[in-house]
Amino acid sequence: ENGEPALVKNTWGQGTVYTFGPDFRDLTFRSQINADVNANRTYSNGFEPGADVIMLIVRNMIMAELPHAIYKHTIPNKGKSAVMLTHDIDSHTGVDTMYDFAAYEMSIGAEGHYNLTTRIFVDSLMSDFYNGSWNQVNTVKLKGHKLSSHSVGHFPDFDDDALFPFGALGNTSSNYFPFNDGNGTSGGSILGELEVSKNLIETDHGVTVRSFRAGHLVYPDSLIYGLETAGYEFNSTYSANDILTSYPFYALQFPSFSAQESSILEIPMTISDVFHSDPINASNYSQKVAQWTDATQRYVANNSPVVLLIHPNRTYKLWAQQDYINQLDPDVLIYSFEGYGDFWKKRDELAYDTEIVGNEMQVTIDDAHLIDEQSFVIDYNGLDTVSFENQSGNPLYFDWINWDNGTRLYYRADAPGAGSIEEIKEKMEIYPNPSQGLIQVTGYEGEFELIDLSGKVCLRGLASENMPIDLSNLNQGIYLMKLGGFTKKVVIN
């Protein structure tokens, strides 16, 4: 702003010197503790690379100056990005409708992430909808999805230090009684919200709760220290747009440059069903999907992850999620939230060395932290061979594909992982089509809807390879069949 250079590049001897004007703490830590003086243009549902740009600049400096540079890919396997499907259950309608989301996600082989508000009491804010929800929640678990905490009370003043002191461990549903009277909350604490919600879900459903997201995405100063104290691993309370970074990072224990780094991995939320000025509804959800898709494409270009948050309390939100997934690039993976967190932790721990002899590069990897999903980007220009081995000298086998700007992506050829949308599409088929009555669906098992061109749902049911679907009672014409996140045309003649 005062005309001084932010970045200077000079040659020095046989090398190059880059000098940044700003302190790196201002370029990275400041946004991670959300002390960036509202530098973001949007809170969510946009593209705010901010601090990510700095890291990409540093990486590109190394790639430009160091021949045959190598870095760990930020997405598992060959993915261009990883989309994580997360849901906040904070209402009766969310409990009632989340089954449809869980069934759809199961049908496409995706693991959804369900953050539960454990409302076991009534106050001015909402009812005790967690009571009596065991069957619905357990069904979500049985469909292969993860359960985690969305606090006990979903209080909008959770970040008020006076109303929510840090507290002490030992909170239970028998001795923790927060209450909001419409003016504010009394009887609450940070550890109370974290500990009681975690213990309730674990006890009621026999799972291990590893993740947290605060109600209203409010972020108390002591939240990270509280999550560490209560035994969590992952947090997704920050919005990526708000803090100018979409990549995971280990959060500081407190919002201060001098604070210690914690063991809590923050995986910021990127896009959501919350649009404050123009809320999503049954008429405009396609516009919101277009906004999600536009933002996602920009993050994909940076190989950064995307966390989608949807409150599963309306059917049109399921349609929006399905349409969004249907429009994803084939190289984008649908990945589990905690699975990506585990990937990132291993990525952070992974160490390797490189040696170049002539035109050959040898990459030696400490395979104690090597997982099958980890791939590497290498500047291949001028190389004849790249080989991999562990510290004992045993070969590690990697395949490769061409990547960006003369680089190659080296990946484990037999690595397991989430399938791409294109692979799922290729397996689906409806025949005969056109049909005179009975049709068969292959490559898909789950719920379907048949919709006429006016938008009316004419038929709902379950599709299975062993169960023909009878359409003989419908009028001749063209229909759209929704199969999970995919829509196919069906003709009846």
Image (cartoon, rainbow, N blue to C red):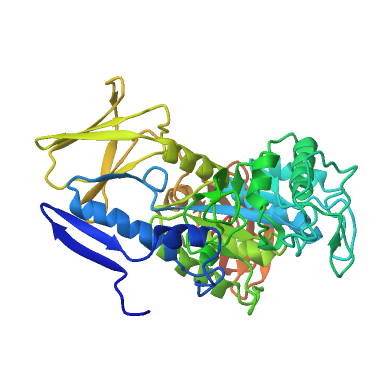
Kindly indicate the quadrant of the structure image that contains residue 10: bottom left
Res 489 seen here = no
Residue shown at 30%/53% (left/top)? 59
User: Is residue 323 placed above or below 446 in the rendered structure?
Assistant: below
Q: Residue furthest front?
A: 258
In this rendered view, identify the residue nearer to me: 50 or 406: 50
**Residue 21 locus on image (x, y percent):** 33, 66
Quadrant for the C terminus, please.
bottom right
Q: Is residue 39 left or right of residue 142?
A: left
Q: Does 232 sit above or below residue 428?
A: above
Identify which residue is drawn at 74% across, 62% down.
160
Q: Nearer the viewer, residue 384 or 169?
A: 169
The x and y percentages for residue 77 are 39, 42
Percent x, y of residue 9: 21, 63
Any part of residue 43 in sight: yes
397 sits left or right of 178 in the view? left
